[in-house]
């Protein structure tokens, strides 16, 4: 005990100050966790909503791009047709 | 007075007793506190912490989506989309004055809803409406009906609808595969829901998260061998053929013989997988894989294989079919007319009963049966599709003369359309048999095939098949402009009560294209075509032609016939 660099009274003051600081730090980090958790929940909700949107758009794209719709528009609206073989040329690689 | 002045001296023992008493009380309290807060035994700290947690900490499932199913080009075929299922705590909801309001909001019958609530009155959970769109669910939840909550779930959508319905199958309302590919690859597609622990308040809202206990593992995506464009084209042509022939059912399947991949498979009747309410299960069967039929004359091709292997015949050997009929046992077999002396090739081109009978008698039924085994008949094709049938080969202790011969015609055995397509794919693949698959294959890492016949035999057989679709053959309607195709027709009497039915048929066609580099095999089956055009050459071959035209165009095959082919040859292939 005689090796203590500080007097007993100073040690007590020092430790008390340390205790106070760490107590405040606990409060601060708890607050941080709360905030972080709220943010996490927001982001999870956002992810969910984005996924909702993504699958909806995916389905939409595939509805618009359905092969039967494409062939219908090609033949009816754009008057396209599969070229006759006599009009085709085969190019070898 | 002296008495009053005299100070009363407390006896010392009383002071000691009081002190001891107070100390004992304090010690008891402290001891109890230690017992409750520090020690573990009995109703100690651990017990209390558990009890506290039981009342506040909840474990929630983190829903995961089911894996995407896509075609070989990455087009999505089955997509899991987030939805919200509305549920209620009946104990909180059953006496609410806003019950009618809620019922109207959900388009439910108010009386039925309150009956249901009374029925589940002592429970804490009851579904109100499952799989609602997130927008709608949010609107309902915003109105804060007592005890009404939402639960996140996923629902399966099939963008291609009925076109891929029978192959993909279905999931049930809880997201588990119950049919088709959804069932076959359930373990792959199905994710593992995660678990997280959190503290919730009185309103059921999370106030503190303890973190994830189990990471959610979403389902993995599955790439099928299917080509959606091709599938659409095949589906369209098959539906059209059904309308034109008035048939009861039909199937079409296209394989890539080189890789063993199933490129397209469609059936009639169909069903809409996106409308669970109006589900008709009669259309749910993938007949091309699950229904076995007698294959009829399409088997004559394999009889030809046995004939060539025996060494007794080559394709130009002459068979005498005069006088156009032959007696086998008690039965007389007829050709449409007397073909006279014709080559083995012509026997197949004309599908001559007499010619095939003579070949079958010369080769023997054991040799034919052996070829059928090697071509995978009576055996599953390896797709792993739920409910796939393997068909049957005859397993008789004693063979009568007629049974030995009808085997060569494709009677007395059963096969599914996919098995027939596989048998022809072996021919197209130079005699190498590969397991079939519904999954996209890496062309550089194909599973090893098995050489089941000599490549020379396969080449000779294909040459004969090529002639079947040419002028004079039974399947001129199978021709595809610009390409040489080969195949074999089949017309089979349906079996009903009391034997073969005279007026009901199954029309078949199995073909290979293009003959310059045989790769795409398509099998067509039309069950009960009506009218005069009931035969394989009239009912099934034109469907083959239209589908194969699309196959060759979509798969970018090089034309090998007609003016174009000639032009190409003349110009040395360069323009």
Image (cartoon, coloured by chain):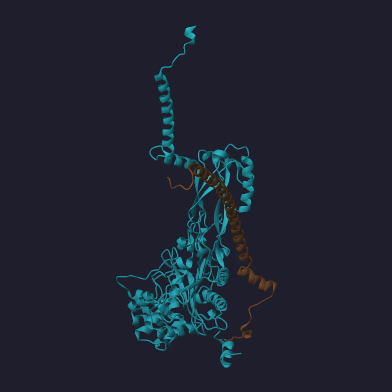
Chain colours: A brown, B cyan
**Residue B396 left/right relative to B64:** left
The answer to whether residue B165 is above or below residue B121 is below
**Residue B507 left/right relative to B104:** left
Q: Residue furthest top?
A: B1
Does residue B300 appear in the picture of this structure? Answer: yes
* Percent of width and height locating residue B280: 53, 58
Q: Residue furthest left?
A: B397
Name the one closer to the observer, A1 or B451.
Answer: A1
Name the one closer to the observer, B8 or B556.
Answer: B8
**Image quadrant where one finds the C terminus of chain B:** bottom right
* Percent of width and height locating residue B516: 50, 85
Does residue B322 appear in the picture of this structure? Answer: no
Q: Residue at x 54, y 57 (%)?
A: B279
The answer to whether residue B307 is above or below residue B234 is below
Name the one closer to the observer, B261 or B5.
Answer: B5
* Percent of width and height locating residue B312: 35, 86
* Percent of width and height locating residue B210: 50, 49
Quadrant in which residue B37 is drawn:
top left
Q: Residue at x 45, y 47 (%)?
A: A4
Name the one closer to the observer, B142 or B401.
Answer: B142
Number of labels in the image equals 0
């Amino acid at each position: 005990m005689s090796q203590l660099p500080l007097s007993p009274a100073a040690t007590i003051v020092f430790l008390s100050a340390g205790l106070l600081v760490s107590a405040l730090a606990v409060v601060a980090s708890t607050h941080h966790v709360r905030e972080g958790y709220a943010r996490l929940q927001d982001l999870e909700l956002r992810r969910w909503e984005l996924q909702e949107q993504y699958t909806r758009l995916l389905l939409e794209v595939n509805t618009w791009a359905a092969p039967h719709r494409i062939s219908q528009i090609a033949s009816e609206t754009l008057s396209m047709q599969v070229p006759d073989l006599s009009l085709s040329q085969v190019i070898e690689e | 007075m002296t008495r009053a002045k005299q100070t009363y001296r407390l006896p010392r023992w009383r002071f000691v007793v009081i002190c001891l008493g107070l100390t004992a009380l304090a010690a008891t309290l402290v001891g109890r506190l230690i017992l409750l807060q520090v020690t573990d035994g009995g109703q100690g700290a651990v017990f209390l912490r558990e009890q506290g947690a039981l009342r506040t900490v909840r474990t929630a499932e983190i829903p995961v989506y089911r894996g995407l199913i896509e075609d070989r080009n990455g087009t999505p075929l089955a997509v899991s989309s987030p939805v919200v299922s509305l549920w209620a705590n009946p104990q909180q909801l059953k006496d609410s004055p806003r019950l009618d309001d809620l019922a109207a909001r959900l388009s439910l019958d108010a009386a039925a809803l309150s009956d249901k609530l009374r029925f589940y009155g002592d429970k804490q959970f009851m579904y109100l409406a499952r799989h609602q769109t997130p927008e709608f669910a949010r609107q309902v939840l915003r109105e804060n009906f007592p005890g009404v909550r939402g639960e996140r779930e996923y629902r399966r959508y099939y963008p291609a609808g009925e076109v891929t319905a029978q192959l993909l199958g279905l999931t049930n309302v809880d997201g588990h595969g119950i049919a088709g590919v959804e069932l076959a690859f359930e373990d792959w597609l199905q994710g593992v829901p995660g678990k997280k622990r959190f503290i919730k308040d009185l309103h059921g809202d999370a106030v503190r998260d303890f973190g994830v206990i189990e990471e959610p593992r979403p389902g993995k995506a599955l790439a099928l061998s299917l080509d959606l464009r091709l599938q659409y084209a095949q589906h369209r042509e098959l539906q059209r053929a059904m309308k034109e022939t008035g048939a009861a059912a039909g199937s079409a399947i296209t394989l890539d013989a080189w890789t063993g991949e199933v490129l397209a498979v469609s059936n009639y009747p169909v069903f809409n997988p996106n409308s669970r309410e109006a589900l008709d299960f009669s259309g749910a069967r993938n007949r091309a894989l699950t229904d076995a039929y007698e294959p009829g004359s399409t088997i004559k091709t394999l009889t030809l294989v046995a004939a060539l292997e025996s060494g007794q015949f080559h394709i130009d050997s002459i068979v005498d079919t005069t006088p156009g009929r032959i007696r086998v046992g008690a039965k007389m077999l007829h050709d449409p007319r007397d073909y006279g002396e014709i080559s083995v090739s012509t026997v197949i081109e004309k599908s001559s009963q007499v010619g095939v009978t003579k070949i079958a008698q010369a080769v023997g039924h054991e040799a034919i049966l052996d070829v059928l085994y090697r071509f995978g008949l009576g055996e599953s094709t390896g797709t792993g599709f739920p409910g796939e049938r393997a068909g049957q080969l005859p397993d008789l202790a004693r063979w009568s003369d007629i049974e030995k011969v009808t085997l060569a015609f494709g009677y007395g055995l059963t096969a599914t359309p996919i098995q027939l397509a596989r048998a022809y794919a072996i021919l197209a693949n130079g005699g190498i048999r590969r397991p079939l698959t519904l999954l996209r294959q890496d062309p550089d890492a194909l599973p090893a095939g098995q050489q089941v016949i000599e490549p020379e035999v396969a080449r000779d057989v294909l040459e004969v098949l090529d002639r079947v679709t040419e002028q004079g053959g039974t399947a001129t309607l199978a021709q595809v402009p610009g390409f040489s195709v080969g195949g074999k027709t089949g017309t089979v009497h349906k079996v009903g009560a009391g034997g073969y039915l005279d007026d009901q048929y199954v029309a078949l066609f199995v073909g290979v294209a293009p003959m310059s580099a045989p790769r795409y095999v398509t099998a067509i089956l039309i069950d009960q075509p009506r009218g005069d055009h009931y035969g394989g050459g009239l009912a099934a071959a034109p469907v083959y032609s239209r589908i194969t035209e699309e196959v060759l165009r979509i798969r970018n095959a090089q034309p090998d016939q007609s003016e174009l082919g000639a032009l190409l040859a003349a110009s040395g292939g360069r323009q």
